[in-house]
Image (cartoon, grey):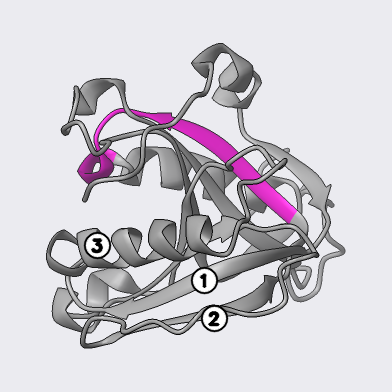
């Protein structure tokens, strides 16, 4: 999956080495939706995403953002051929419509708003197929803070493959992000209250 060249300083993201919960405003994005194995449809999706992004003049006087994607919940239980990827770039409010274009089969494009609110995020360093331990670490943190995730997860590709090649996957940097809501307290015990032994359960 090749992304456009990105001019970012990885040091700017070091503060995300530890999980955190923050408030994030909703954002207007150019979104390309693709169904299928991302290793097979990702290149076409990102190709259309950047093609439209530059054709609508979004980059004029506007710093090109880092690409991101959202995935539905329960990917482990869904065949990769049925995965739904929503690939996006942040756009300014001045962009009101998309030019005429012919998307590849199974791919659509639109201008929409990604909702955020309370979110949890963490920086993953390394290959995409090795994200699970980082995801589990983030989810454990979310639970201890009294929240639960919903709506699947988001990936922001700070450093990844570019049009020039795949680069070194061990040096990829991806922000993993979830939207949050307050979790229901355990039945019979207020949230945050522990048993006399000091341990829940």
- Residue 28, x across and y down, in percent: 72, 66
| SS type, badge 2 | strand
Q: Relative to 180, is 73 above or below?
A: below
The residue carrying mark 1 is 31
The residue carrying mark 3 is 42
How dense is the environment of label 2, judged by Cα within 10 Å: few (below 14), some, or many (20 and up)? some
Q: Say whether disc 1 or disc 2 marks the residue closer to the N-terminus.
A: 1
- Residue 2, x across and y down, in percent: 24, 46
Q: Relative to 3, is 158 above or below?
A: above
Who is closer to the viewer here, 64 or 13?
A: 64
Who is closer to the viewer here, 70 or 59?
A: 59
The reply to whether the magenta stretch includes residue 90 is: no
The answer to whether one can see residue 72 in this image is no
- The residue located at (75%, 43%) in the rendering is 21
The quadrant of the picture occupied by the C terminus is bottom right
- The residue located at (42%, 56%) in the rendering is 50
Q: In which quarter of the image is residue 188?
A: bottom right
Instruction: Give the magenta part as a residue range.
Output: 119-130
Q: How far apart are marks 1 and 2 (CA)?
A: 5 Å
The answer to whether one can see residue 40 in this image is yes
Identify the disc placed on residue 110. 2
Report if the CB atoms under discs 1 and 2 are less than 8 Å apart. yes
Q: Relative to 99, is 123 above or below?
A: above
């Amino acid at each position: 999956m090749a992304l456009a060249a990105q001019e970012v300083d990885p040091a700017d993201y070091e503060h995300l080495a530890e999980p955190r919960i923050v408030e994030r405003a909703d954002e207007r994005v150019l979104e390309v939706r693709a169904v299928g194995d991302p290793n097979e449809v990702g290149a076409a999706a990102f190709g259309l995403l950047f093609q439209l992004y530059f054709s609508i003049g979004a980059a004029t006087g506007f710093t090109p953002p880092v690409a991101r994607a959202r995935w539905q919940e329960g990917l482990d239980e869904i065949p990769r051929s049925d995965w739904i990827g929503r690939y996006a770039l942040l756009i300014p409010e001045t962009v009101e419509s998309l030019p005429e274009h012919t998307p590849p089969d199974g791919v659509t494009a639109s201008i929409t708003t990604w909702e955020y609110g309370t979110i949890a995020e963490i920086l993953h360093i390394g290959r995409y197929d090795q994200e699970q331990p980082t995801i589990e670490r983030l989810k454990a943190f979310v639970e201890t803070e009294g929240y639960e995730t919903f709506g699947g997860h988001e990936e922001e590709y700070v450093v990844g493959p570019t049009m020039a090649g795949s680069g070194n996957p061990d040096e990829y940097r991806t922000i993993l992000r979830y939207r949050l809501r307050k979790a229901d307290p355990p039945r019979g015990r207020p949230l945050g209250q522990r048993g006399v032994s000091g341990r829940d359960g």
